[in-house]
Structures are given as C-alpha cells and as structure tokens.
Image (cartoon, rainbow, N blue to C red):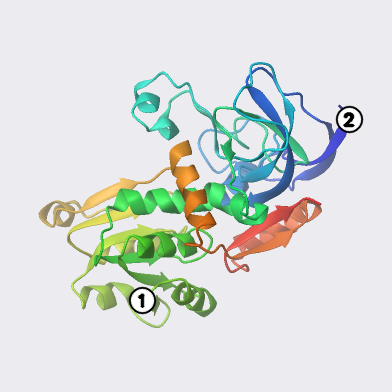
Amino acid sequence: MGTMKAAVIEELGAPLVMEERPIPMPGPGEVLVRVEACGLCRNDIHAARGDWPMKPTLPLIPGHEAVGKVVGLGRDVHGLWLGDRVAVPWLGWACGRCEYCLSGSEALCRRRRNTGYDIDGGFAEYLTGSERFVVKVPSGVDPLDAACLSCAGLSAYKAVLSSGARPADLTAVFGVGGLGHLAVQYAAIVGASVVGVDVSTRKLEMAASLGARKVINATAVDPVGALQATGGASQAIVAAASHDAAEQALASLRPGGTLVLLAMPPDNMLRLPIAETVHNGITVIGSIGGSRVDLARVFTLHAQGHTRVVHQARVLSQVNQAMAEVEADKVPARLVFEFR
C-alpha cells in the first residue's frame, strides 16, 4: 500500500515526531480515507501531554477532526463508495448494543473507541474509519470547514441542545474562540439572545459579527454583575478552558438557570456552592460530543448557510508550532491542517 507522512506521539509531553508510516489497510466494516483536512483540537494537545487520567497507548497518531475521500473499502462495507467525502470524528466506534447506544447516547458507550486517542487519527495522510461511524459530508461544504465542524461544531451544537436554550432566552457563552464562536451561532439559530464573554477584543468582535447581541470584555467589566443586572442568564455555556470562567458562568445564572460545561481546564476543578445551587434550582450539565445524527445536522445547517467557521490553515509539518499557538491563545478560532 506504500507509506504516508504522519505526526506521531512517541512520548507524552514531548513534541510530536514526523514519521513515514505504512498506509493502513481497512479491516472488515472499515474504509480507508485519504485526508484532505484535519482540525487541531485542544483534546489533541491533552492527548499529547497525557493530561487526562486515562493515558493513550503510544505510539499514537492523534487527530479527530479528519475529513477526506474514501479510497479503499474493507470487506462488508455496503453504505459507502469510493470517492465519497466523509468525516472521521472523535467517536470512532461504539458497540451499538448497550443502553447508551440504543437510547441515542452513543457518545457515552462504555466500550467506545475515540479517534486519535484510542485508535490512530487524522494527523496523517491516510486513516481508517468504521463505516458505521464516519459521516458523509454534503457536497458544497469545504473540507476545512467540515473538519472543524466534525468536533468543534458538533460539541457546540450539542452543548446548545443540552442547555435547553429557547427563543428569547438570554444565553451567555463564556469563551468565544474555537468552540464558542460556533456555540454563539447555534444559540442564535434557536432564537436565543446571545451574550459573548471573553478577554479578547478580537474574539468579541468576531462573536458580534456571528450573532451575539451583546459582548462583555471580562478584563474591563465584571461579567457576573453585568449579566445579573439584566436578570441573569437562562443558560451559560462554558467554552473557555478556565475554571474562573466556569465559576463566573455559574454565578451569572438566574434562578432555574443551566450551566453547561464544555471546555475542560487543566486543573479540572469547579467550586460549586451547594446551598445556592439547591435554593436557586440550578442545573449543571457536562456536555460531551453528540451522535452521528447530530453531526449530520451540523453539516446540513452549514450547507444551508446558517453557520460560518473561522479558521486558519497550516500544514502538518507545523504541528508542534500550531499546538504552541493554540496553547498561547494566538489564533482567533480554529487551526486546520490542510493536505494538498
């Protein structure tokens, strides 16, 4: 099958290594995808750093926002054809038989395998994906957009759904970068009055251009006081990897409000005042990525022109530089590796 270039985690905490790897062979029920684009998500950085309790098995090719064309079919593949453009998302495989899978919560399957964490991902010229879990990309959707939507878009969409945001609700999005700029748009689509909160003027300007009716610069204005002065937020979605943002979001809620935790800060902690949470009837939700149906809807919304993805392109050989850019918060929204 030949060889391919891949960025590989050889050691946790060390820079990724560019290697020549054999092009993988698709097994039964799998397809081989030639990658056109793969987004860089903070979860890829967490994988490379070994930040989470469950460590990945090394060596590993990260990347779970891969989009490309099917160039090989394994045995017993019946629903895809050579040339189909597909996304290979974070949820790489689930059992399909457990209570979670059967109730539409396949992202919670206890046997799930995540792309770029449990199995090799898209920081490579080729990867394999399960026919059942890759998702077709509609014609006319740019591969770079589709790559970002396959994780950031899906996660933001599911967070808005989980929040219960409705028309005329005041929905605050804390952190309007890679995840948050999409959460702003999905909340606006359902008719909520969206407030974007961030510490970057550039990101706040972007949020306003994407549908936020009001923006708050948390370095100049106390977001809790500003939101409570209007009666409090019905929903607060935390898309910033900061426990300070999470605590501000919680304090900004009106009675009966909902806090949705989406981004995961390195310190992994949130101080939760129990009495106030109980007395005010506050709901706290952890939002994990959605299902294949959710991703198909995300793609459809984009194909219909309802969303815009803000991204910058890089090449795979810049992987370590790109990770440093994301960690230093030097990019407006998303970075995507483009394969030519």
In the rendered image, which residue does mark 1 sit on?
213
In the rendered image, which residue does mark 2 sit on?
2
**Mark 1 falls on what kind of element?**
loop
Give left or right: position of 94 versus 123: left
The location of residue 162, given as percent across then percent down, is 32, 48
Q: Picture quarter containing residue 110?
A: top left
Q: Residues within 10 Å of mark 1 (few under 14, many from 20)?
A: some
Quadrant assignment for the N terminus = top right
Look at the picture and state if 154 lies above or below 221: above
The location of residue 325, given as percent across then percent down, is 66, 63
Q: Is residue 155 visible?
A: yes
Residue projecting furthest to the right: 2
Q: Picture quarter containing residue 83?
A: top right
Instruction: Name the residue rendered at 87%, 33% in the picture.
Output: 3
The location of residue 317, given as percent across then percent down, is 81, 52
* Mark earlier in primary sequence (1, 2): 2
Amino acid under disc 1: Arg
Give left or right: position of 39 versus 318: left
Verify CB contact (< 8 Å) between mark 1 and mark 2.
no
Label ID, residue 333 = none
Instruction: Name the residue rendered at 28%, 60% in the picture.
Output: 235
Q: Residues within 10 Å of mark 2 (few under 14, many from 20)?
A: few
**Mark 2 falls on what kind of element?**
loop
Q: Picture quarter containing residue 118?
A: top right
Amino acid under disc 2: Gly
Label 1 to label 2: alpha-carbon separation:
52 Å
Q: 61 or 336, which is in the foreground? A: 336
The location of residue 199, given as percent across then percent down, is 47, 74
